[in-house]
Amino acid sequence: MNAPFQQPPAVEAKPPLTVLIAAPRGFCAGVDRAIEIVERALDRYGAPVYVRHEIVHNRYVVESLKAKGAIFVEELDEVPDNVPVVFSAHGVPKSVPAEAERRELNYLDATCPLVSKVHRQAERQVEAGRHIIFVGHRGHPEAVGTYGQVPEGQMTVIETVSEIESLEFPADMPLAFLTQTTLSVDDTAEIIAALKARFPGIVGPKADDICYATSNRQAAAKQVAAGSDLVLVIGAPNSSNSVRLVEVAKRMGKDARLIQRASDIDPLWLEGIETLGLTAGASAPEVLVRAVIARLGEWRRVDEQPIVAAEEKMVFKLPRQLAS
Ligand code: SF4
């Protein structure tokens, strides 16, 4: 008897999709440290541990920590006495630890050391008698925290080059500039050049205070965008560095979208797309990147290609209370 006829293996019906995946992407050393502080505090003190503001701007991270016993609040007066409280990676105005001390709260400061560095610069500039022009996003917790390092009236916040025109200071007023850590590298260079042109005596850091993680992610996003038809950035709408990554790609003339999770992807976006760029802001965990790749794989045959712009080895020490 003849052997039964066997069908050849099904030809892969899905069209191919090259995914250029940025490196570095996702968590930075400051975010790793902040999350570890909350986790270690939960281990050491038990639940609940209060956290003032989202520890980092990512819902997935916040929900995971909530599930372990963290309680997120916006202000210190929502924290009961006798429970530990963690301050977020973005930093806080000086009044916040001062109030925690007055109430004798056990507080842990998860402010990123690179944000703290800007705080110390602000103090030093004011001590030296200079008025500070801070380049940052009004209302962003990092800008609020830095503003709160110096007495009222000693710092002016600007967001754009166009605001420099309307700045008025007495001719003999010494000036300094500082910047938020998560700004656009290109925009900030332009703003600083305009500040120096308008106020030739202004002093500041050598270039800006944009952190290594923000610069590296923007450099990688540029390289990825250069070869892509569409760029997806995983991050939250209130995550400054994630929004900047979308801007970087758009500025290169590419279609770019901010998504919070894999389910945000509309398959229609992929029509006619052969090469897709993928990156993630500094507060987005790798698990979300893997979920995006898996979802893309539902519709297309994904060929993942890393684009490496920089190697990162930065690690920040934990606060003394949790180090051992
Ligand atoms: S993005 Fe930069 S400043 Fe912000 S937490 Fe990460 S390393 Fe620190």
Image (cartoon, grey):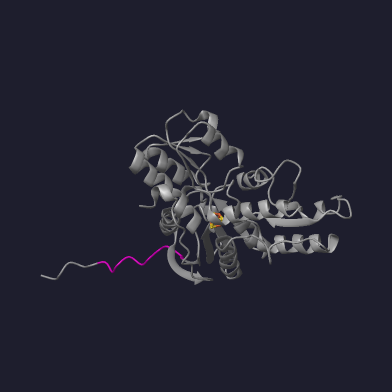
User: Where ligand 1 lies, by quadrant?
Assistant: bottom right
The magenta segment: 7-16
Membership of 18 in magenta stretch: no
Residue 11 or 90: which is nearer the viewer?
90
Residue 10 on the magenta segment:
yes
Q: Give how far across and how far down residue 66 sits, in percent.
A: 41, 38
Q: Position of residue 147 (x, y in %)?
A: 68, 45
Q: Residue 93, located in which quarter of the rendered image?
A: top right
Q: Which residue is pictured at 60% across the width and 64% down the height?
A: 215
- Labels in figure, total: 0
Q: Is residue 167 above or below residue 218?
A: above
- Residue in view at x 44 percent, y 67 percent: 304
Q: Pick the residue in front: 130 or 53.
A: 130
| Residue 70 vertical placement versus 283 (above, below) | above
Q: Which quadrant of the rendered structure holds the N terminus?
A: bottom left
Q: Is residue 22 left or right of residue 41?
A: right
Q: Main secondary structure of the magenta part?
A: loop
Q: Is residue 131 left or right of residue 207?
A: right
Can you see residue 242?
no
Q: Position of residue 239 (x, y in %)?
A: 57, 49
Q: Is residue 267 left or right of residue 179?
A: left
Q: Does 262 appear above or below 48?
A: below
Where residue 229 appears, as percent x and y from the top left, is 59, 65
Quick one: which residue is furthest to the right in this view? 171
